[in-house]
Amino acid sequence: MSALKNRTPSSLRTALGNRVVIADGAMGTMLQAANPSLADFQGFEGCNEILNVTRPDLVSSVHRQYFEAGVDAVETNTFGANLANLGEYGIPERIYELAESGARIARTVADSFSTPDAPRWVLGSLGPGTKLPTLGHVTYQELRDAYAIAARGLIDGGSDALLIETTQDLLQAKAAVNGARIAIDECDRDVVLIAQVTVETTGTMLLGSEVGAALTTLAALGVDLVGMNCATGPAEMSEHLRTLSKSAPIGISVMPNAGLPILKDGGAYYPLSPSELADALSDFVDNYGVGLIGGCCGTTPEHLAAVVTRIKNRSLSTRTITIEPGASSLYQFVPFRQDRTYLAIGERTNANGSKAFRDALNRDDWQACVDIAKDQIREGAHMLDLSVDYVGRDGVRDMTELAQRFATATTLPIVLDSTEPEVIRAGLEHLGGRCVINSVNYEDGAGPNSRFARIMPIAKEHGAA
């Protein structure tokens, strides 16, 4: 891991580069066990983040219990301090307030446990919300800007890292990373950026993304660690962590549930004992080189105390990493180098190269355009070239219409083929995977107002190749 340019590396970044860092466990169930009253929620029952301002003592107590168990870091009580969750309560304007107060509470407790030789850290939690941009529930820009507000609050409150967690949609992850990056770039200190995805028992994320697609997307966005949390226990995560261990060019984190939940006495019961969780995380550290560990649903201070006993101050295990450059769709990773053939890019979804596609575009027949793309998938293409640049057409509108459809209707990475920066931006803001940008050239020079200069920041924001 490398420090952000021109900033002194934080003690957390230094620790993550040398040893295993242990984070806390579940927050929500701990708060529920404290039995807050209806009055504590100020009419927003179930919104745990409100307790940051009404009952900071309860939130502090949870942090304290985890630090007493021996953990190195705690997550802020801000999982739901986001656009979608607070929007459902009608208070989206309180994102910054609740994020900042949650971080400040955790910072105060962490400082009370810190010593010069053993600093304690705060991980600012950025949850996924309930709106999936890939499915059109919210726009990329709306989500990114809201995450930037939450991230500012977390940083201002004293977070050492921003933890994007329980990610279910790669476009949502991209918005969260870039919102966090905006806030980090505005501050004057080093803040570690971590992104964790949630893989269901089906073996993919909620929208069908494989771990390889998630890794390709997130690594290209410049996060410091990539990992997994929630949905399943350690057993179900093992093979996916093996993939990350072999392929991730950055550090790895994992925060599993205490096993798969079992319905018992009208509620969810998590069966994994503290010693079993400690055994599993110890194996992950030894076998997969995981550097940041903790727990998610069903884990308690007792679970983390067992983890601390087993793993405290353990050095990072060495990983053998094979980096394979490539692109990804929402669903899958595709390497640029093919073992038995050349990389085949389907060109029939190009308005300048296919009359059938151009005619469908001119009729606004979006389904016909999608059908042409699917034909190329069946014929063995590895990626799809998408170009809507055609005289008399509104390229931004056309790209928006098609990119949002291609995102879920096709399984292959998209090559965005345009010389217009805003057309490329429109495509990238609707595609969750790692795209390739085509037709970038120096025809109008490389000055600050050239197309090249305007496209490069867009490519960087979205991690495009």
Image (cartoon, grey):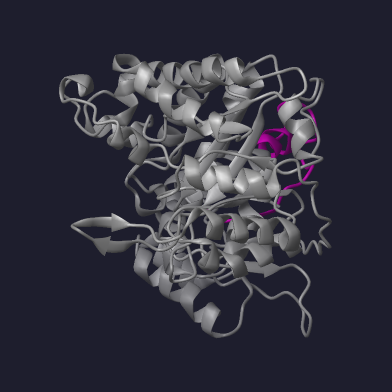
Res 434 quadrant in image: bottom right
Magenta span contains residue 403: no
Q: Image check: 264 left or right of 401?
A: left
Image coords of residue 465 (percent x, y): 71, 52
Quadrant (top left, top right, bottom left, bottom right) of the N terminus: top right
Q: Nearer the viewer, residue 160 or 351?
A: 160
Residue span colored magenta: 431-457
Residue in view at x 39 percent, y 40 percent: 139
Residue 113 seen in the current view: yes
Q: Is residue 2 above or below residue 106?
A: below
Residue in view at x 76 percent, y 77 percent: 338
Residue 464 seen in the current view: no
Image coords of residue 184 (percent x, y): 63, 24
Q: Nearer the viewer, residue 196 or 430?
A: 196
Q: Image check: 286 left or right of 280?
A: right
Q: Image check: 41 left or right of 368?
A: left
- All told, the count of numbered labels is 0
Main SS class of the magenta portion in the image: loop
Q: Is residue 371 above or below residue 105?
A: below
Image coords of residue 457 (percent x, y): 67, 35
Q: Is residue 367 above or below residue 196?
A: below
Image coords of residue 182 (percent x, y): 59, 26
Q: Is residue 141 above or below residue 184?
A: below
Magenta span contains residue 455: yes
Q: Nearer the viewer, residue 449 or 296?
A: 296
Q: Nearer the viewer, residue 15 or 344?
A: 15
